[in-house]
Amino acid sequence: MRSLYVLLMIVGLCAEAFAEGCIVRSQDDRVEVKVCQQNQSIPETLFRTGFCNPALKDKKVEVTFVEQCPAGSFGICRNAQVSNMPYRQDIHYYGVASDARFLKPACEQNSAGEWVTE
């Protein structure tokens, strides 16, 4: 019984490690972009230091870590896969809803994700 309890605790901790998101805001002189990446299977350190740490030339970037991505996005690329990697994440898009015409095909074709709207 004790080993079952320990196993359930370990599974719970692993699931909690992936219950994390990051809001990335970038801005230049003309455009402000806001996305939220909800981790599905990316190791925590790699998610925080790589996926949530974009290097965007000539743009001001602000990253905020959250437990879950906030509501209000105009579209979500669910279960997006990073090219040449086994990792998955949900990417929430905020801002200009007409951008969906570019983001939906990219989600489905490049990331093997599923485009959904809230």
Image (spheres, rainbow, N blue to C red):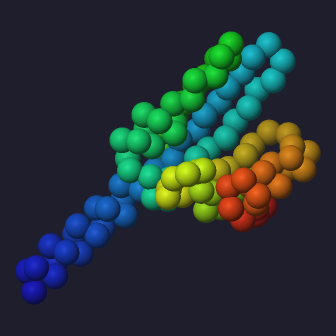
The outermost residue toward the front is 84
Measured from the top left, where is residue 65 in percent x and y? 48, 39
State the residue at coordinates (22%, 69%).
9
Looking at the picture, does residue 56 appear above or below residue 117? Answer: above
Q: Is residue 38 left or right of residue 11?
A: right
The answer to whether residue 47 is above or below residue 68 is above
Closest to the observer, 94 or 109:
109
Q: Position of residue 6 (x, y in %)?
A: 15, 73
In which quadrant of the rendered image does the C terminus lie?
Answer: bottom right
Q: Quadrant of the N terminus?
A: bottom left
Taking the image as drawn, is residue 72 in sight?
Answer: no
Instruction: From the viewer's side, name the closer residue of 102 and 68.
Output: 102
| Residue situated furthest bottom in the rendering | 1
Return the x and y of residue 113 as percentages of the image width and height.
68, 62
Q: Quarter of the image holding residue 105? A: bottom right
- Residue placed at 55% from the left, 51% from the top? 84
